Amino acid sequence: MSPLGTGPRGGRWLELRARCETSQHEAGDRSPIDRAELADALVGLGGRAVEERDGWFVTHLPESPDSDAFMESVAPRLGRALGTPVTVAFGWCDVEDWAETWKRGLRPRRLTHRLWVTPSWGSVGPGPEEIVVVVDPGMAFGTAEHGTTRGVLRLLDRVLVRGDRVIDVGSGSAILAVAAALLGAREVVAVEGDPVAFDYARENIERNGVCDRVRWVEAWADSGMLRTFGPVDGIVSNIESAALRRLIGGCRDTLRPGGWIILSGIQADEWELFALDVVHSGFVLEAEDADGEWRSGWFTRPVLG
């Protein structure tokens, strides 16, 4: 989901600091709505985690060849998203510095009545019916700090039936694959083409005790490759909408009749057209999840047809 990619193990990370022009006094003067909206907007740009520091909201993104153009676009994009002028500032930090900094911005999150996501250093005292996904993203995309991830997890808790076989397309940190396994999937195939993600995903799979149910496949997904894993009960995918469109036909062919897909990575202004395209490809829209400017959808393949 990050416009700048996942970043190399070496190199630098871009530090982005932002604050609303109407809220520049003290951090405590900012309303809870302002705080949440600004934090969500930064994550929506691809920020790995967000912390408040001296009246600024601070996040980090990996360096890329497009970093200069990205920096020029940030203030206008945030201003449009929030409806108020936004002041931004930038800096660079080494990987080692960033790796410790992003930890400060992550915290346990409750997504549904029973589903939690927490970093490994977080503290959650789950009840007997609660499910806790412990995930550290490292340099791979995937925490519950992003609206697309939250949307998929909320829908996944509604849809998945114990014993389902599931494919996670664009697995990143493996947060969705791990959640599916903990929710009762008997087998999850996690497909991810970015080799940087592998070590972090493996650690997350191991720390959640689901190695026997999650199989990692290092490959860029295409429709033909997906079909080799079918038939499956469900597919989850949180990637860019253009990539999702290319996979819709393959997803349909890979699902058993009556199977489901949960798709995310779609912004609000493109959701209606995107959902219509999926329906025209042979799916039924069952439910959607709205989280800030992001939309996630649960679709099913009809039993007949």
Image (tube, rainbow, N blue to C red):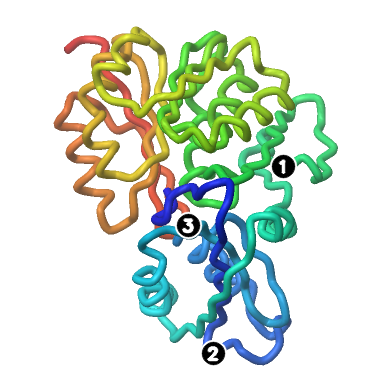
Which residue carries the number 3 mark? 46
- What residue is shown at x 32% (from left), y 14% (from top)? 255
Q: Amino acid at mark 1?
A: Thr
Marks 2 and 1 in Cβ contact (< 8 Å): no
Marks 3 and 2 in Cβ contact (< 8 Å): no
- For residue 175, which quarter of the picture? top right
Q: Position of residue 293 (x, y in %)?
A: 40, 59
Q: Is residue 43 left or right of residue 55?
A: left
Which residue carries the number 2 mark? 22
Q: Position of residue 17 (x, y in %)?
A: 58, 75
**Neighbour class for label 3 at 10 Å: few (<14), some, many (≥20)?**
many
Q: Secondary structure at mark 2?
A: helix
**Along the line of sight, which residue is nearer the eye, 123 or 136?**
136
Q: Position of residue 113 (x, y in %)?
A: 66, 37
- For residue 112, which quarter of the picture? top right
Q: Amino acid at mark 3?
A: Gly
**Neighbour class for label 2 at 10 Å: few (<14), some, many (≥20)?**
few
Say which label, 3 or 1, has the lower sequence index. 3
Residue sticking out furthest to the front? 10
Q: Amino acid at mark 2?
A: Thr
- What residue is shown at x 28% (from left), y 25% (from top)? 222
- What residue is shown at x 55% (from left), y 42% (from top)? 140
- What residue is shown at x 56% (from left), y 61% (from top)? 13
Q: Is residue 128 left or right of residue 249?
A: right
Q: How far is mark 3 from mark 1, CA to CA? A: 19 Å
**Neighbour class for label 1 at 10 Å: few (<14), some, many (≥20)?**
many
Q: Is residue 41 left or right of residue 92?
A: left
The circle drawn on residue 118 is: 1
Q: Is residue 31 left or right of residue 285?
A: right
Give the foreground label among 2 and 1. 1
Quarter occupied by the C terminus: top left
